Image (cartoon, rainbow, N blue to C red):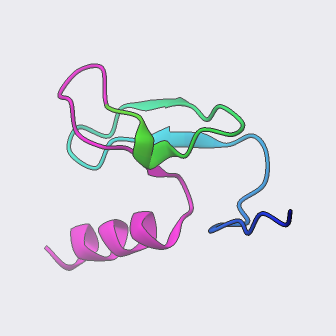
Amino acid sequence: MVVKRRHEMGAGGQCICPKCSKKSIHHDGIPCQDERCPDCGVKLFREGSYHHKLLLKKQQEK
């Protein structure tokens, strides 16, 4: 059985909260979006992902 990966970010890296910017270590096999920020409960983004880049762009426009 072939399993398709949705993202090819590789091992390592960090997950980041879009609300409070708290960072946590990315765990292999667990998408950042399946984890929640321990401080505010928001879904996390993978640092360097498409959604993280959109958030940074939006913050720069302010």
Choose between 61 and 26: the one closer to the eye.
26
Residue 58, magenta (yes or no)? yes
Choose between 4 and 8: the one closer to the eye.
4
Residue 30, magenta (yes or no)? no
Query: At 33% from the left edge and 76% from the top edge, which residue is drawn?
Result: 57
Query: At 31% from the left edge and 67% from the top edge, which residue is drawn?
Result: 55
Q: Residue 5: percent from the left, percent from the top?
A: 70, 65
Residue lying at the far top in this picture: please name it.
38
Q: On the picture, is 25 further left or further right than 60?
A: right
Query: At 67% from the left edge and 43% from the top edge, which residue is drawn?
Result: 13
Quick check: 51 above or below 41?
Answer: below
Query: At 17% from the left edge and 28% from the top edge, which residue is drawn?
Result: 40
Residue span colored magenta: 37-62
Q: On the picture, is 31 further left or further right than 41?
A: right
Quadrant for residue 42, please give it. top left
> Count the marks: how many?
0
Q: Residue 4: percent from the left, percent from the top?
A: 73, 69
Question: Quadrant location of the C terminus?
Answer: bottom left
Q: Residue 15: percent from the left, percent from the top?
A: 50, 41
Residue lying at the far front in this picture: please name it.
1
Q: On the picture, is 19 further left or further right than 32?
A: left
Residue lying at the far right in this picture: please name it.
1
Choose between 24 and 41: the one closer to the eye.
41
Question: Quadrant location of the N terminus?
Answer: bottom right
Quadrant for residue 25, please give it. top right
Choose between 35 and 56: the one closer to the eye.
35
